Image (tube, rainbow, N blue to C red):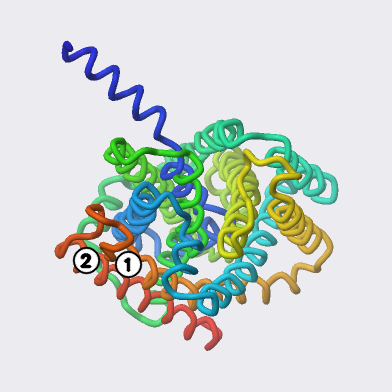
């Protein structure tokens, strides 16, 4: 076989495998994540850009462990946790995951409403329409049709890159502070760092990554292409996060404008960087929120059905997986209704709760993931080797410390 033919075969195989890693990594840039990156960029400017590459590496490693487990075992993370750690541990994790994901779902539907209002549209009209379209996409679709829509949504994240370019950053200063930062390490800076880690590496993404890899049916012989899928997803997500911070650091930080949400950032960008920059930032928020509003209910439903041993999957009909579709519908209805009807001041405690719940749940899920990925009885020859075990536990310890710090600082009211 010629070099050109081998290259074509490899590209074709990668095209068959790509999806779970790219989609999971990018959808983590949802409304809550964008708000976190915007606030950090507005407050600390370029001086917090160094966190993005580090978090991208950690995120990629976590997603790769989940992808590897899915290919090696053919089972989702929820099912493996139930089999290895028992019903009680699985039940506690599922309860925490459901509550956290519902809060995050509310956040995403709120992001849709806030984003469309920047364009002069009514949230009371758009949010119900978005909820119906999200619901119908999964109810009437198949795994491959849903995945195609997710691929399209991934491309809309380029709006943040364009926004940052329109903001005319000082590229030399940005690169210098990325490679040689001078962090202040006061308590508010620490909170921003751990908030970015918590927003980027969320418990739901591990469950979704593994479940979607299983549903895609990637064989072990194509595992290296799955690695490239995860790698590209982690890089793409980190680049988007970097440019969100860059956009806000180049404009809001220089003007001394602090924001607490992505919609505030978009509104504040208008008089500083122009309508195009603000509009693209708002369009990215609407797209990311819709993306998250679709995948979070899928992740929640799939994880719970796996833990309970119920049939699940987008390819299943309602009669084959009634629990799956009923739970999926309930999560969307609750998320959209609360986001639409609750006053804004009532949404703040929900967001705080989701941060705390994420911070408590993430270390537990990470520990389970590393133990499972290291177990030769489960993984066979694909179990983590000694070097990767050390890296996994160090990364797990770092993320756990950051997450628990975020819990303490959030409860303290910082």
Identify whether 194 is placed above or below 74: below
Mark 2 lies on a secondary structure that is helix
Q: Nearer the viewer, residue 158 or 166?
A: 158
Place residue 161 in its image quadrant: top left
Left or right position of 351 against 398: right
Nearer to me, 216 or 229: 216
Of mark 2 and mark 1, the one earlier in the sequence is: 1
Verify CB contact (< 8 Å) between mark 2 and mark 1.
Answer: yes
In the rendered image, residue 287, in percent from the top left (x then y), is placed at 61, 42
| Image quadrant assignment for residue 396 | bottom left
- Residue in front for this viewpoint, 118 or 191: 191
Residue 195's disc number? none
Q: CA distance from mark 2 to mark 1?
A: 8 Å
Q: Which residue is mark 1?
A: 370
**Residue at 52% across / 49% down in the picture?**
27
In-image side of 340 versus 407 (left or right): right
Q: Which residue is mark 2?
A: 389
């Amino acid at each position: 076989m010629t070099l050109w033919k081998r290259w074509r075969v490899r590209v074709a195989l990668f095209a068959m495998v790509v999806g779970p890693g790219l989609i999971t990594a990018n959808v983590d840039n949802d409304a809550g994540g964008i708000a976190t990156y915007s606030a950090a960029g507005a407050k600390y400017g370029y001086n917090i850009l160094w966190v993005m590459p580090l978090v991208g590496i950690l995120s990629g490693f976590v997603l790769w462990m989940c992808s590897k487990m899915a290919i090696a075992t053919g089972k989702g993370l929820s099912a493996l946790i139930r089999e290895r750690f028992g019903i009680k541990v699985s039940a506690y994790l599922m309860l925490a995951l459901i509550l956290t994901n519902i809060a995050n779902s509310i956040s995403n539907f709120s992001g849709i409403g806030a984003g469309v209002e920047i364009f002069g549209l009514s949230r009371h009209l758009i949010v119900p329409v978005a909820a119906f379209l999200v619901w119908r996409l999964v109810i009437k679709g198949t795994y491959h049709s849903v995945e195609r829509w997710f691929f399209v949504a991934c491309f809309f994240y380029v709006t943040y890159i364009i926004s940052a370019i329109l903001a005319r950053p000082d590229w030399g200063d940005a690169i210098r502070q990325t490679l040689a930062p001078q962090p202040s390490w006061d308590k508010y800076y620490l909170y921003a760092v751990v908030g970015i880690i918590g927003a980027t590496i969320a418990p739901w993404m591990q469950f979704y990554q593994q479940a979607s890899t299983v549903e895609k049916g990637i064989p072990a012989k194509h595992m290296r292409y799955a690695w490239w899928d995860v790698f590209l997803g982690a890089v793409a997500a980190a680049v988007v996060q970097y440019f969100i911070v860059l956009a806000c650091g180049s404009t809001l930080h220089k003007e001394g404008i602090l924001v607490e949400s992505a919609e505030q950032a978009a509104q504040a960008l208008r008089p500083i960087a122009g309508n195009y920059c603000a509009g693209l930032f708002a369009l990215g928020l609407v797209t990311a929120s819709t993306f998250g509003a679709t995948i979070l209910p899928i992740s929640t439903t799939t994880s719970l059905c796996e833990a309970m041993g119920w049939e699940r999957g987008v390819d299943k009909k309602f009669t084959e997986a009634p629990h799956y579709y009923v739970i999926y519908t309930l999560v969307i209805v609750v998320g959209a209704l609360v986001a639409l009807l609750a006053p804004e001041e009532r949404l703040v405690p929900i967001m705080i709760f989701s941060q705390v719940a994420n911070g408590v749940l993430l270390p537990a899920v990470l520990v389970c993931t590393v133990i499972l990925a290291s177990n030769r009885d489960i993984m066979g020859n694909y179990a983590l080797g000694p070097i990767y075990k050390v890296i996994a536990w160090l990364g797990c310890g770092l993320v756990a410390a950051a997450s628990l710090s975020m819990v303490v600082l959030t409860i303290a009211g910082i």
